[in-house]
């Protein structure tokens, strides 16, 4: 039987859990996110309290045992929310600490390969958010966008937008995970909105949009259609690049002409 | 009645869509002092049109009025289309507002020729200048240089634009003369060559002195129309190879000719040569990223690209004696030549084999298209594939299994 450990879903929480595993010499551990967990009949889960000091110690140790960039890859695995994310991460941490040498990046190893694959999926989603976020200006002069990405990518997209839109206030909100990023011209913060009032759970209410906002959406949608070469039309390719599930946020797809 | 901006946008985007360049990469314009925009990344496709092409920039003509009459062009003088012209402010406004909403990476501005080349270029530059100086816009700007442009005008264009392009359009001078009587290659090559040395010089200067501003940091590109004139793939790709090495272009674009006019100067194509265009891009890619020489891809003996199989596979089938490649021993460059193995997989193979033998299952999991690759590689514990003895059978086996007409990248 393995020990079931529950953590809060943050990177600090995960590495605190690793700390506990080593401290208590737990041989067979299973780690799960607290909010995903539903109790099994014979489970006796232990909830780990996130402790930044413990987490930092493990992270520092891990960095020393692994080539550059691996900690970032591991963090992305944790934010993928995939079923096997914690198992993979735990395996990799264990192999890093079990050998006196630096961790081998050997893609014949299941966990290493899977980490690479999950990172590829994460990067694609991050890239898609860089591309598909569509801001709408509100009456408060905030450029606001709602998203619901396949994975929890909010922590990885802020940097890009902060550099790009330094002279406008903006908000990017993940309506699925109910949190987002807000930039107020000075700094970017992670926030949770209490009275968001989304329309049909994911769209910004038209009533809060600035005057004339609709015109830009329309102009953009018109542009989108005019720039297509009818003789080359290829919907299969189009759909491959712009999958259906993203359409609701794209004025060029959501508006009908 | 005055035309509204939306209508203009429709007309002038429609007229600009045949220029296939879309890239917004290769620049390094950082957002300093809290301006708007940042063009340091790899370039982003913000959408894809229904023809499957990337939409990265607001691609428009300043006007589709034109004094020339190039047979392949919708905006030619003799064509009966609705004409429109933007004002400078209209373009600036659209660009800024689209950019702020994250629709685009920036602007790609071209134009029909009114009066003469420089007069037209100056108007385009005015827009770029306004964006950079008055709006502190750091997004991507690609300006078209109209053939025949003077160096003074280009000097200014390079101050504000990330990328500049002079389009060759028709791959040979002889064909060009026939189709576009007012044009010649000299008027294209002169500005192109001038830009090549100016960009070079600027790069050197920037290494030496930090203060020097950048000149067209995204380099230059060009476009050729494919299928409107009789040049073979051999001539086209030789030309590209020269353009990449001599003129140091960042990109050469190929635009399959879309039969838009019944002009007798042009061949009577029924449909655009899209497959051929795709093969040219694949060949171009092999040249730029896979270490192939153009002469290995096309030659007098094989002057046209094979439409049935991609150029990398075609190369392997023509050179059976080079295969199979032993993935546990061969150098990286050779592994990259295995059909079905891309750059990422090749890197993973080379990284992993330091720790032990890489097997067929590993290669598969690393993302190779094993159903093609298996004929060309040697792996531990597998019989040698039959490529060397029977390339014809391998060819038909692969074409047969593909069957569904899917487009694969190598
Ligand atoms: S000069 Fe340019 S816009 Fe004018 S007809 Fe020729 S290709 Fe078209």
Image (cartoon, rainbow, N blue to C red):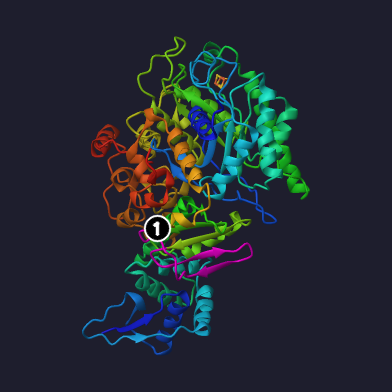
Query: For the point 37% across and 35% down, which residue is it?
Result: B310
Q: Which quadrant does the N terminus of chain A fall into? A: bottom left
In this rendered view, identify the residue nearer to me: B79 or B251: B79
Instruction: Report whether residue B340 is seen.
Output: no
Dot 1 crowding, Cα within 10 Å, few <14, some 14–19, many 20+: some
Say left or right for B139 vs B78: right
- Asked which secondary structure carries label 1, the reply is helix
Please state the extent of the stretch shown in magenta in the rendering: A175-201
Asked if residue A185 lies in the magenta stretch, the reply is yes
In this rendered view, identify the residue nearer to me: A238 or B320: A238
Establish whether ligand 1 lies closer than 8 Å to the Cβ of label 1.
no
| Residue B142, x across and y down, in percent | 60, 37
Say left or right for B288 vs B156: left
Q: Chain of mark 1?
A: A
Above or below, B356 relative to A128: below
Q: Which residue is mark 1?
A: A121
| Residue A207, x across and y down, in percent | 46, 56
Q: Quadrant of residue A39?
A: bottom left
């Amino acid at each position: 039987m393995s020990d079931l450990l529950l953590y809060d879903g943050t990177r600090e929480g995960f590495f605190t859990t690793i700390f506990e595993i080593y401290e208590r010499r737990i041989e067979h551990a299973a780690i799960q996110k607290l909010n995903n967990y539903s109790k099994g009949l014979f489970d006796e889960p232990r909830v780990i309290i996130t402790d930044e000091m413990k987490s930092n110690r493990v992270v520092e140790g891990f960095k020393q045992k692994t080539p550059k960039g691996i900690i970032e890859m591991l963090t992305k695995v944790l934010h993928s929310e995939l079923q096997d994310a914690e198992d993979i991460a735990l395996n990799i941490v264990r192999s890093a600490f079990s050998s006196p040498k630096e961790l081998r990046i050997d893609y014949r190893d299941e966990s290493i390969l899977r980490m690479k694959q999950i990172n590829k999926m994460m990067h694609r989603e991050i890239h898609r958010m860089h591309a598909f976020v569509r801001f709408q200006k509100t009456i408060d002069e905030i450029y606001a966008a709602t998203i619901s990405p396949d994975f929890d990518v909010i922590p990885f997209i802020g940097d890009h937008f902060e550099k790009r839109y330094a002279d406008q206030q903006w908000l990017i909100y993940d309506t699925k995970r109910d949190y987002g990023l807000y930039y107020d011209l000075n700094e970017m913060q992670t926030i949770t909105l209490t009275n968001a009032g989304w329309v049909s759970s994911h769209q910004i209410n038209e009533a809060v949009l600035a005057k004339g906002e609709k015109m830009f959406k329309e102009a953009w949608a018109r542009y989108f259609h005019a720039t297509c070469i009818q003789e080359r039309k290829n919907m299969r390719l189009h759909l491959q690049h712009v999958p259906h599930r993203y359409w609701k946020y794209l004025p060029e797809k959501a508006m009908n002409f | 009645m005055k035309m509204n901006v939306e209508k203009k946008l429709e007309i002038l985007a429609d007229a600009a869509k045949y220029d296939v360049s879309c890239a917004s990469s290769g620049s390094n314009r950082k957002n300093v002092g809290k301006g708007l925009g940042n063009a340091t990344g790899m370039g982003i496709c913000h959408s894809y049109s229904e023809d499957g092409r990337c939409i990265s920039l607001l691609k428009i003509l300043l006007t589709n009025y034109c004094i020339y009459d190039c047979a392949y062009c919708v905006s030619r003088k003799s064509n009966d289309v609705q004409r429109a012209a933007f004002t400078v402010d209209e373009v600036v406004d659209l660009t800024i507002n689209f950019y702020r909403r994250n629709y685009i990476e920036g602007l790609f501005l071209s134009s029909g020729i009114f009066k003469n080349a420089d007069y037209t270029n100056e108007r385009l530059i005015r827009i770029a200048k306004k964006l950079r100086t008055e709006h502190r816009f750091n997004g991507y700007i690609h300006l078209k240089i109209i053939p025949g442009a003077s160096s003074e005008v280009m000097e200014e264009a390079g101050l504000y634009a990330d990328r500049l392009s002079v389009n060759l359009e028709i791959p040979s001078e002889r064909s060009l003369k026939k189709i576009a009587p007012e044009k010649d290659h000299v008027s294209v090559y002169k500005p192109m060559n001038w830009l090549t040395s100016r960009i070079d010089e600027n790069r050197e200067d920037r290494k030496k002195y930090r203060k020097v501003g950048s000149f067209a940091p995204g380099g230059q590109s060009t476009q050729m129309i494919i299928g409107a004139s009789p040049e073979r793939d051999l001539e086209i790709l030789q030309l590209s190879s020269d353009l990449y090495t001599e003129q140091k272009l960042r990109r050469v674009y190929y635009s399959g000719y879309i039969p838009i006019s019944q002009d007798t100067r042009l061949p009577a194509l029924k449909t655009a040569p899209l497959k051929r265009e795709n093969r040219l891009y694949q060949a171009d890619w092999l040249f730029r990223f896979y270490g192939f020489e153009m002469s290995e891809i096309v030659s007098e003996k094989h002057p046209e690209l094979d439409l049935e199989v991609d150029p990398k596979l075609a190369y392997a089938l023509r050179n059976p004696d080079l295969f199979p490649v032993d993935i546990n021993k061969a150098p990286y460059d050779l592994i990259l030549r295995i059909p079905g193995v891309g750059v990422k997989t090749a890197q993973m193979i080379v990284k992993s084999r330091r720790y032990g033998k890489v097997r067929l299952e590993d290669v598969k999991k690393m993302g190779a298209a094993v159903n093609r690759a298996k004929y060309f590689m040697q792996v531990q514990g597998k019989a040698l594939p039959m490529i060397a003895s029977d390339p014809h059978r391998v060819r038909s086996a692969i074409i047969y299994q593909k069957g569904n007409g899917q487009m694969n990248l190598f």
